[in-house]
Image (cartoon, helix red, strand yellow):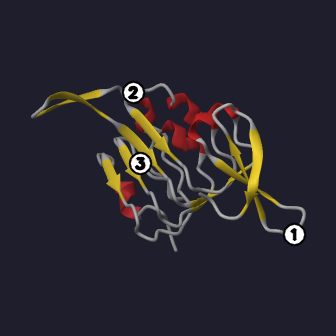
């Protein structure tokens, strides 16, 4: 328990790549510090330079803070890097897949759909129904309490943008 990201990240404004997959992190996501602001005492994080944030396959719960849509991952221009095979574009990424995130799936994620260099993965969570039709391309599942006592009814927004029940059980 505690924070999903260590508090030391509050003092790391030049941190660009955060990979903390499979680490049993089990706290809610903290809000981010708005660009140009100092990290607050209440626990926001200065991720002003982050290009890749991967917290996949942990136990992070709660909702995705709406201000995650302001992360530099989504605001930065394409970065070209020289490799042995030539010039490549650095892919910016937010991966929160395989956690216990709930609440509504933020519609700001749809702004990345047609970007060649921004990737967002939030599959394998428990978002509230309905999933916005603008996120249908992500094939996200949502969960509604079943009224017949069988547990959780699973719904998925398919690529056509139509939500429908797909049975009971766990997330796939």
Q: CA distance from mark 2 to mark 1?
A: 44 Å
Q: Examine the rendering and report whether any part of residue 36 can be seen.
A: no
Res. 79 image quadrant: top left
Position of residue 51 measured from the top left corner of the image (x, y, whole percent): 35, 41
> As displayed, is residue 89 above or below residue 167?
above
- Which mark is in front, 1 or 3? 1
- The local secondary structure at tag 2 comes to loop
Q: Residue at x 56, y 55 (%)?
A: 124
Choose the circle earlier in sequence order: 1 or 3: 3
Q: Residue at x 65, y 64 (%)?
A: 170
- The local secondary structure at tag 1 comes to loop
Camera-side residue of 51 and 125? 125
Choose the circle earlier in sequence order: 2 or 1: 2
Camera-side residue of 89 and 9? 89
Please name the residue that numbered disc 1 is placed on.
149
Position of residue 85 measured from the top left corner of the image (x, y, whole percent): 13, 31
In the image, which disc is placed on residue 116?
A: 2
- Which mark is in front, 2 or 1? 1
Please name the residue that numbered disc 3 is placed on.
46
Choose the circle earlier in sequence order: 2 or 3: 3
Q: CA distance from mark 1 to mark 3?
A: 44 Å
């Amino acid at each position: 328990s505690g924070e999903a990201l260590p508090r030391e990240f509050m003092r790391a404004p030049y941190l660009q790549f955060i990979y903390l997959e499979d680490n049993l992190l089990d706290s809610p996501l903290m809000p981010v510090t708005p660009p140009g602001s100092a990290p607050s005492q209440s626990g926001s994080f200065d991720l002003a330079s982050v290009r890749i944030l991967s917290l996949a396959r942990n136990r992070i719960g709660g909702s995705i803070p709406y201000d995650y849509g302001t992360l530099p991952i989504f605001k930065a221009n394409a970065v070209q890097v020289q490799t042995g095979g030539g010039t490549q574009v650095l892919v910016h990424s937010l991966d929160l897949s395989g956690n216990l995130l709930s609440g509504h799936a933020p519609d700001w994620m749809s702004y990345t759909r047609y970007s060649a260099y921004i990737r967002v993965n939030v599959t394998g969570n428990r978002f509230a129904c309905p999933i916005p039709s603008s996120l249908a391309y992500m094939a996200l599942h949502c969960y509604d309490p079943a009224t017949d006592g069988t547990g959780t009814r699973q719904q998925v927004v398919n690529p056509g943008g139509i939500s429908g029940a797909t049975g009971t059980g766990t997330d796939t």
